[in-house]
Amino acid sequence: MPNPKRRHSKARTAKRRTHDALRSANAGECPQCHEMKLSHQVCPHCGFYKGRQVRAVDEV
């Protein structure tokens, strides 16, 4: 197994890791109840997805 002959500098390592940061989840407004929800997910507040009720939500 080949091993590096010389160590990589901190700058070179940091340049490689610039794209490793986590981004926040992409949220949008639910067209039914206007709460924020994740894209392509059932709304946790009203249970609607693509304009129809797909999950019953307990009203508390």
Image (cartoon, rainbow, N blue to C red):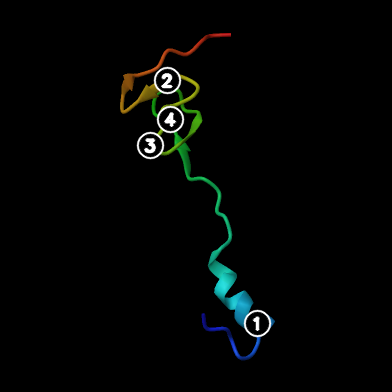
Viewer-nearest of discs 1 and 2:
1
Label 3 SS = loop
User: Would you place residue 24 above or below residue 38 in this image?
Assistant: below
Would you name the residue on which mark 3 appears? 40
Q: Nearer the viewer, residue 18 or 3?
A: 3
> In screen coordinates, is 32 left or right of 12?
left
User: Would you place residue 22 above or below residue 42 in this image?
Assistant: below
Mark 3 or mark 1, earlier in chain: 1
Would you name the residue on which mark 1 appears? 11
Is mark 3 in CB contact (under 8 Å) with mark 2?
no
Would you name the residue on which mark 2 appears? 47
At label 1, which amino acid type do we have? Ala
At label 4, which amino acid type do we have? Cys
Q: Position of residue 24 (x, y in %)?
A: 55, 49
Label 1 SS = helix
At label 2, which amino acid type do we have? Gly
User: Would you place residue 38 above or below residue 22 in this image?
Assistant: above
Picture quadrant where residue 32 is located: top left
Q: Position of residue 41 (x, y in %)?
A: 41, 33
